[in-house]
Amino acid sequence: EVQLVESGGDLVPPGGSLRLSCAASGFTVSTSYMTWVRQAPGKGLEWVSVFYRSGATYYADSVRGRFTISRDNSKNTLHLQMNSLITEDTAVYYCARALVVRGVEVAFDIWGQGTMVTVSS
Amino acid sequence: IVLTQSPGTLSLSPGERATLSCRASQSVASSMLAWYQQKPGQAPRLLIYGVSSRATGIPDRFSGSGSGTDFTLTISRLEPEDFAVYYCQQYGSTLWTFGQGTKVEIK
């Protein structure tokens, strides 16, 4: 079964750090286009970061310079290292895999259940 | 690119037709517009990609249309399980953006 399971969410103080993990099963992370999307309480979806199959990475303006996306091919896992956290980073963080159609990533078809990050003193 | 969805909330009865709008601030490549459904406490579910292609397992009462800057998700006859929040999404210049969502609620 194709599945994503996130972990690592926690309560952290402003300025703190946290590392999220997303374990994949049923497919290979290293040959997939993987992303993180977050959702603040009661709000909409916000794209955070992407890891291309090629190894290229991109970030939303709101997290660039503070967050780092990476993957561990040996563990088939995606990570999100979050530093210098601010209260606005409080959200459920989802990892997702892109659907590829004729070699082009067109949407996200597999999602994890999400992990909650709360930034508060 | 900013995506603006309307209306914010749609109040309808089961069996009625739902028409949701997504307007982009710039033209969107046709293969890069998708729609998702999200229910409370759940992850989003992909409904439509490439403007009008249904994802695996999505019933044919869901359909997508549009081009350029104006896109529409239509639910032909609302089933009880269709009451949820719907988001459009686009991809361009290595960045993805979502609309703010439309809530379809039971009237």
Image (cartoon, helix red, strand yellow):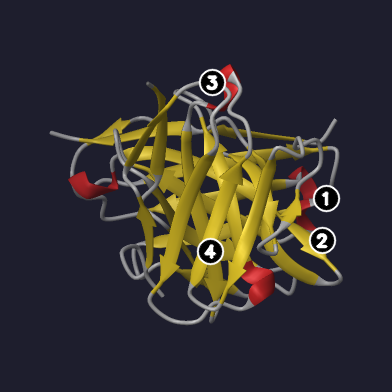
Instruction: Say which amino acid is labelled 2.
Output: Thr
Instruction: Say which amino acid is labelled 4.
Output: Phe
Query: Badge 4 is on which residue?
Result: B71
Both marks 3 and 1 on one chain: no
Distance between mark 3 and mark 1 Cα atoms: 41 Å
Q: Nearer the viewer, mark 2 or mark 4?
A: 4
Distance between mark 2 and mark 3 Cα atoms: 42 Å
Q: Nearer the viewer, mark 2 or mark 3?
A: 3
Query: Badge 1 is on which residue?
Result: A28
Report the label total. Answer: 4
Q: Which sits earlier in the primary sequence, circle 4 or circle 3? A: 3
Determine whether the residue tagged by mark 1 lies in a helix, strand or loop.
loop
Distance between mark 2 and mark 1 Cα atoms: 6 Å
| Viewer-nearest residue: B10 or A14 | B10
Mark 4, Cα crowd under 10 Å, few <14 / some 14-19 / many 20+, is many
Q: Nearer the viewer, mark 3 or mark 1?
A: 3
Q: Chain of mark 3?
A: B
Determine whether the residue tagged by mark 2 lies in a helix, strand or loop.
helix
* CB contact under 8 Å: marks 2 and 1: yes
Query: Badge 2 is on which residue?
Result: A31
Query: Badge 3 is on which residue?
Result: B14
* CB contact under 8 Å: marks 2 and 4: no
Q: Chain of mark 2?
A: A
Would you say residue A90 is visible in this rendering?
Answer: yes
* In the image, farthest residue toward the front: B16
Determine whether the residue tagged by mark 4 lies in a helix, strand or loop.
strand
Distance between mark 2 and mark 4 Cα atoms: 31 Å
Q: Chain of mark 4?
A: B
Query: Looking at the picture, does residue B40 appear above or below residue B5?
Result: above
Determine whether the residue tagged by mark 3 lies in a helix, strand or loop.
loop
Mark 3, Cα crowd under 10 Å, few <14 / some 14-19 / many 20+, is some
